[in-house]
Structures are given as structure tokens and as C-alpha cells.
Amino acid sequence: MSIPARTQSLPDVAGDQAQAARLLDWVGMARIALPLQVEAGEGGPVTVAASADVGVNLVDPDARGIHMSRLYLHLQDALSSETLGRRSLHRVLQDCIDSQRGLADRVQLTLRYDQMLRRPALASGHSGWKSYPVEIDAVLGPDGLALTLAVAVEYSSTCPASAALSRQLNADRFARDFDGAAPDVEATRAWLASPRGLAATPHAQRSRADVRLVLADEVEAFPVLALVDALEHALGTPVQTAVKREDEQAFASLNAENLMFCEDAARRVAAVLAADPHVVRFDATVSHFESLHAHDAVARVRG
């Protein structure tokens, strides 16, 4: 069935005068589906599914509305043909402002997607994929372009207090079992390797570091991979992908070497971000989803 051609222009009531005239800070759309081309490490750029919020300020108090469909159409394919970066975002955002024909002088674009990174196992030589949620906030206005990058990293946290209490119980059981005797090395090793050698285990839990960074003006590409690597190295116990028995044993060893309260984790994260010359400001939150308590332990730090 064909659609007959229109011989008359279509009405556009968005151009009518507003009844209660005033400026608006943000008008736009949320959760637009978009393809993005993002850097994925040594394999080069890849296309990912993303969600976008885009909006402009309405600087004409008498205008009833903005040209919303123009924002949508400008975004649909603009970020799928080249790797996401400062230059590509600046061009797209400027096009969005220009499309409003004087109705706006500021645009804000928020992009959300999952960055898939292949991570090696600790000991077995295997590897697996892990998903990292990424959010990019780009604002273009009279003062220029401002970029904010947010990433979340999951890790394991073992409680130092619980570890100390567990060690005390292990020591007390050892003293009772040997009752003043002086066991040799082999007897002690056999006891430690037996069920008797583990009187208690410290509690640990999956945890998450959420970081939000204001990037310096000279930063062109979004350093997602470098940021994830630095944070996981500082925390010491990133959540794993492929796990064989030798990997699980290595992970248990890392947890023993990296006992952390949420305060400790927050300081480790802050040290990484404060030392990064590409970061102007940062806001970090670490959350330990407690296995002992029904509530979470949380620490926040800015710099």
C-alpha cells in the first residue's frame, strides 16, 4: 500500500508561543538506543550497543519547544563510524546546538554502555570476558567542552578484623591440640593441612568501586582499559572470569595479601586517581556488600 504524497506542509505547533514564558535548563530525550564505536585495547575499536540521554537548554523563553527530532536524527549514526573521542563528540554536540537554530547554546549528552574486556586467569593460562559498565557525560556550551568518564570495577574484599579473629581461633586450637608439645615441621604441616588446621575463616564479599573522573582538556581518547587495569592492580583482588583450581588457590592467596576495610579500598582507589595526570577531579565510592551484615559498608573520597 503506497502512502499518498502530501501537497501541503505539515503543521508544527512547537513553534507556537509559550503560554508561561521562561527559560528551561534541559529539554531532550532519555534512553535512546545507539551504536557506538569504542576502543577495545589491542584488538582495535569495536561497535557496542549503547543508551543515550541528550538534551539542550531552551534559551528563548517565548519558544514553546525545541526541535527534538533533529537531536535524535543527528545522533543515530554519528558515533558509529569513528572511534568515540573528544573530537567526534565535539562535532556531534556542535551539530546538535546548530540544529536548534538559536533556541539553545548548551547541549548535554550522556552515553552508557558495557565495555567487554578479556581478562587472563591467575594461574591456569585460561582467560574469559568481563563486562565493565561505562558512562560518559559530555557537555558543550559557551565555556567549551567538558568530559566526564565513569567506570565500575568489581573486586573481592576480605575483612581484616575477621581475619585477625580467625587467626586467633586457629592459634588457640593449635595450642589445645598439641597441649604444650613441641611438634616437628612435618607434624605441624600435617595438622595445618587437615580440617583441624582451619578453626575459622574470615568473611569476604564481592565489592565494587565506582569512579567518576573529569578529564583534562588534552585527553582525546577515553582511557577505559588503562583505568580498569590501574584500579584492579591497586585493589589486588579483581573478580575473576575463568577459574580452575589453581586459579582459585591463587585468588585465595591474593585475598590474604590484600585484607581490606572499605576505608582501605577507598584510599587505594584515590591514590591511583590522584596520580593520573589525565584526571582533573575525581569522585569515588567503594561498596562492600557485606556477608556478615545485612547492610553494606561504603566509603567515598574526592580529589
Image: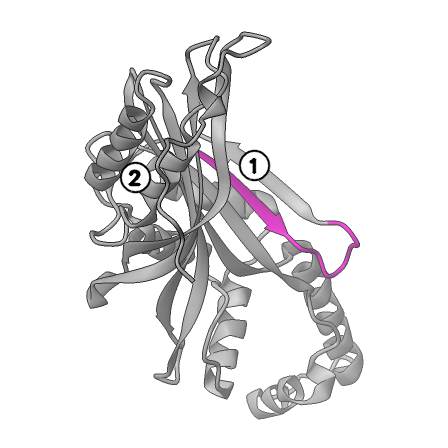
Residue in front for this viewpoint, 204 or 149:
149
> Could you tell me the amino acid type at mark 2?
Asp
Tell me which residue sits at (23%, 45%) in the image.
221
Q: Residues within 10 Å of mark 1 (few under 14, many from 20)?
A: some
Instruction: Find out whether residue 25 is within the magenta segment.
Output: no
In this rendering, the answer to whether 216 lies above or below 150 is: above
Secondary element at tag 2? loop
Identify which residue is drawn at 67% across, 55% down: 289
Image coords of residue 293 (percent x, y): 78, 55
Q: Residue at x 24, y 33 (%)?
A: 90
Across and down, in percent, residue 77 comes to 29, 50
Q: Is residue 285 magenta?
A: yes
For residue 152, above or below residue 129: above
Across the whole image, how many numbered discs are drawn on residues? 2
Please, is residue 227 above or below residue 250 in the view?
Answer: above
Circles 1 and 2: CB atoms closer than 8 Å: no
Please state which of residues 259 and 199 is positioned toward the viewer in this rendering: 259
Q: Residue at x 48, y 81 (%)?
A: 243
What is the C-alpha distance between the residues marked 1 and 2?
A: 18 Å
Read off the residue under disc 2.
Answer: 276
- Mark 1, residue position: 300
Res. 197 image quadrant: bottom right
Mark 1 and mark 2 lie on one chain; the one further toward the N terminus is: 2
Identify the element where label 1 is drawn.
strand
In the rendered structure, which segment of residues is drawn in magenta? 282-295
The amino acid type, in three-letter code, at marker 1 is Arg
* Camera sees residue 27: yes
Q: Which mark is residue 57?
A: none
